[in-house]
Amino acid sequence: MLIRVPALHDPLPSEITPRHAYLNRRDALAALGLAAASPLALAQVAPGGGKLPKLPGARSAVPGAMVMDKPTSYTDATSYNNFYEFGTDKADPASYAHTLKTRPWTVSIEGECAKPGRFDIETLLKLSAMEERLYRLRCVEGWSMVIPWVGYSLSELLKKAEPTSKAKYVEFTSLADKQQMPGVRSGVLDWPYVEGLRIDEAMHPLAMLVFGMYGEVLPNQNGAPLRVALPWKYGFKSAKSIVKIRFTEKEPVSSWTKAAQQEYGFYSNVNPNVPHPRWSQATERRIGEDGLFAKKRPTLMFNGYEAQVGQLYAGMDLKRNY
Ligand code: MTE
């Protein structure tokens, strides 16, 4: 039985983009002629970006896809990363991921499906309409961010492969290339990085296949050229730089489960009531809110997405299935 904590879902007043600021942004875009040139430009919710090619997306209509929280700055979101293929320090991916070659890039779809195949990145970019979604990202380490991703529901791709009735799970595999990824030369994880979901989780509209952020293509350190984003799960469930998607009958074994089974369960739903064996998960530090007086935030059940995803876990003991 799930315990509902509705009060915790309400954003803090300081997190909400004031209506006048939102309208001003629309006006500024219109003044630049952007709004007229493309209705998609109106959808931009986040400030800034780098100098990467533009990748706009229409504001998503998927329920829960646009949280009201203030977006993390582009600088923070692209310089404080976990991408162990490029090193274990938070600054390593931004320093070393330029060696990743994101073209040509192919994703193979395999396993329990009627139409397995290989999709090149250009085809994937055109497979469905790009949407912008503002998602919370909660890392198991206790920090969080709010990122405007660009992409579409993962289900759009998965259903093209026509999974069979034996497809109970979906396994994601990231690229592991020692030439391009210096961290892969270390034994810190059992490479390649592997993660998995139950098929109904993967088919949930909030499970997103991501190609961009902040209105631009993904920077390498954030998982270019494509990754997943699962806003109700700890960040490590969202594999970066994916090269293989496999439908399986058996529960996939993730790299983190192999590394420390008692610490990283298969579900890894954000749950303030289940501490990590070495630390609490009850609060989080929002990156960008550092400072002497910055209070930690209470972590929300399912990271605040309980209304959308809670039913997927009805009847499950979430203390055992962590
Ligand atoms: N994917 C791969 N291939 N390698 C990784 O090390 N780290 C995970 C996840 N995906 C990781 C990965 C973790 S622990 C987190 S918190 C998120 O990516 C971080 O995503 P971000 O750097 O875009 O914020």
Image: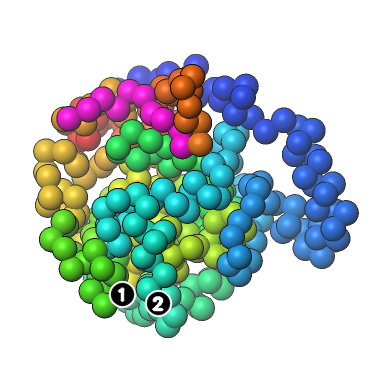
Identify the residue at horizontal 56%, vertical 45% (top origin).
73
Identify the residue at horizontal 59%, vertical 29% (top origin).
15
Magenta run includes residue 286: yes
Q: Residues within 10 Å of mark 2 (few under 14, many from 20)?
A: few
Q: Which residues are magenta?
A: 278-287
Vertical arrangement, residue 11 with respect to residue 322, above or below: above
User: In the rendered image, which quarter contains the C terminus?
Assistant: top left
Identify the residue at horizontal 36%, vertical 65% (top origin).
96
Q: Amino acid at mark 1?
A: Gln
Identify the residue at horizontal 54%, vertical 65% (top origin).
217
Label 1 belongs to which residue? 180
Magenta run includes residue 281: yes
At which x and y percent is residue 212?
Answer: 53, 61
The answer to whether residue 296 is left or right of residue 316 is: right
User: In the rendered image, which quarter contains the N terminus?
Assistant: top left
The answer to whether residue 215 is left or right of residue 251 is: right
Residue 302 appears in the figure: yes
Residue 185, quarter of the rendered image: bottom left
Q: Residues within 10 Å of mark 1 (few under 14, many from 20)?
A: some
At which x and y percent is residue 166?
Answer: 23, 61
Label 2 belongs to which residue? 101
What kind of element bears circle 1?
loop
Magenta part, dominant SS? loop
Vertical arrangement, residue 58 with respect to residue 121, above or below: above
Indicate which disc, 2 or 1, sits on the residue closer to the N terminus.
2
Q: Nearer the viewer, residue 73 or 192?
A: 73
At which x and y percent is residue 121?
Answer: 46, 76
Q: Label for residue 120?
A: none
Residue 59 appears in the figure: no
